[in-house]
Amino acid sequence: MKLSPISLAVLPLLTMFSAQAAVYQIVELDTNNKVRATSGAAATLQGAVVTNGSTFLDITLDLDTLDFESETIKSLLTEEQLENAKNGNIDAAVTNILVSYLANNPSVRNQPIGVSRIFNQSQNGLVAPLVVRDLNGSRTNTEFAYAVNNSGQIAAIATAPAAKLNFTPVPEPVEEDDEEEAEEPEIPVIPQPYTAWVPEPGYMLGYVLDGANRIVLPPAYTDLGGGMSAAQDINNNGQVVGFTSAGVTDAIKTSINGICTGNSQPLQYCQNLAMSSRGISLSTLIGQIRLYQTVDSLPQGYDERGALWQLNTDGSASLVKTYGFLGDKATGQLAPNSEEYPTPTYYSRANAINDAGIAVGHSLYSDKDRIVSFFDNFGFEYRRIYTAPHATVYQGDDVKPIVDPAEWLASVAVDINNQDLVAGYAYKNINSAVRAKLFTYDLAANELTFVDGFFNSSGTEPRAMNNQGQIVGRAEVIIGGTVDRRLHGFLYDSQSGTFSDLNDLVACDAPYTLVDATAINDNGEIMATALVRRPLLDATGQQQTAEDGSVVLQEQATAVKLRPIANGQPANCDGEDTRYERKSGSFQPVWLLLLAMFPLFRRRFAKG
């Protein structure tokens, strides 16, 4: 299970928004100026709230490592700004420009810019960062929380922070066959040292935060840069699930060793970059499913496997096992090699675990007898065996499917509760578009149920579920009088079958649009993401002002908690049907980019 009940002691200390008629009271969680946007992650039994924040507002730029002679940087700054920056003087506007430049131009010479960090809001309402790997506060890595158990132990991931060092390249050795053809240059080329930003080993590692202890989840395989692990969920018995590097083929090892020699750039930088860029991305696989009705190709990096770790009494964690995959026709076996199609690269990932130790997630399924043909943009035809990620149950040594691949193109299981009820979503072609549909699966009864959501063609993606079978997530709605689709947070009660827009369950005058719901505890308290208009902060965390001195307001994403109101009833907002239209703000396209960041981690690093 993902969440624990929130202590009511914390509630009076947080900002609240309520009204006489509503089902939920909105409690805004973040009150810091260290990040621009936040998303709810989890809540501890003691009342502390865990959130993830994106777009750092307290980055210290290392100006000594910036190349101010670069034509790109010259084009971004005025002459005055450039000269001031060379002398170490930059204002918020220049800081914002340079941070954006570095974030969009990663290289061994450029200071890395992290994407997100974790915050803990304690019972007294104070917000403090939870540090996983970035012990020096460099802001060069990404840290993200996913789950918490009843002991307050938090499952998280952290990419590798980087430190700068002086690196001197050496010429690549000349192969013997090329020695005769190689000509001595008139002027010998002497490699020049440069400042490099070098990450720690392990491009991504899973952790459990237990008070002041940071417990790393050891990868199953650590060659080629330190390996990889990721924590996705933790149960009340200290069992943690996620995924890990489990090996690598000889061909990949030879390829990486040929690329990463340590001559032109630091070896650790090259290995981390090579292996991270070859990691499985669920969003990429689903994108191929939308285009071709099958996975076209998978990255050739680490063999990735779902994994189970156990926390030990000495403050460490042990890798208990790696999970298998569905494989060809759900046999757990590889598809046979053939000249007719490329052999798939199989993987598995575990997204959640209940207290009985049953885990769920997704893994690669294939059917060697189901050939899919498609054309690329140049008119070339390709043939592939049907291959797709599909929802998977890991029970003991068994690896079992949930949905029928003949009916659904792909699927993912996101959670399982202590009643062995599984929540997930599956994709199929609906109204000429591939859309996701929420499902529940009763493991004991072997009963699979699909939920339409707001309407038949509404894409519906669950995030989490509690022990009462209440499921939260996000789904498409259609704005009244238009054909535009936007995202709204939803609540589905699997026992009663009711499916509700969370925006219909809060007060009409609430200044929020609830666009996602990421967690729910057994008290029915929901962690959600809302859009709200508030002062725009610059790169240093200060409010931006217009030329007339007024504060600039902008619609921004913020983490909120929805607290159930005893005997609450849905508000009647001016007698209008608010299921598809609400007065609290529009969902502008720019927010599709911002809000996509948090699901990216759940798909790329976490839920996929």
Image (spheres, rainbow, N blue to C red):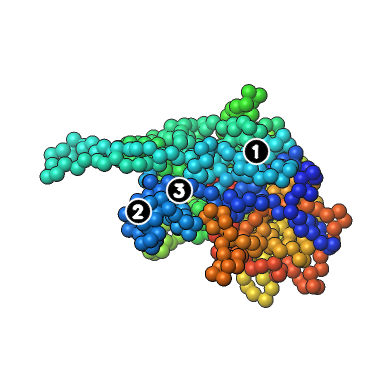
- Look at 37% across and 52% down and name the residue there: 86
Relative placement, left or right, of 500 versus 256 is right
Q: Label 3, secondary structure: give it.
A: loop
Which residue does the numbered mark 2 point to in the structure image? 68
Q: Label 1, secondary structure: give it.
A: strand
Nearer-N-terminus badge (1/2): 2
Relative placement, left or right, of 366 versus 265 is right
- Look at 54% across and 58% down and name the residue there: 538
Crowding at dot 3, Cα within 10 Å, few <14 / some 14-19 / many 20+, comes out as: some
Residue 518 versus residue 366: which sits nearer the camera?
518
Which residue does the numbered mark 3 point to in the structure image? 61
Which residue does the numbered mark 1 point to in the structure image? 154
Q: How far apart are marks 1 and 3 (CA)?
A: 30 Å
On screen, 194 above or below 377? above
Q: Which amino acid does label 3 sit on?
A: Leu
- Look at 56% across and 54% down and name the residue there: 541
Residue 113: % across, % down: 47, 48
Q: Is residue 491 visible?
A: yes
Q: What residue type is labelled 2?
A: Phe
Residue 591: % across, % down: 58, 62
Q: How far apart are marks 3 and 2 (CA)?
A: 13 Å
Residue 354 versus residue 574: which sits nearer the camera?
574
Q: In what quadrant of the picture does the N terminus appear?
A: top right
Nearer-N-terminus badge (1/3): 3
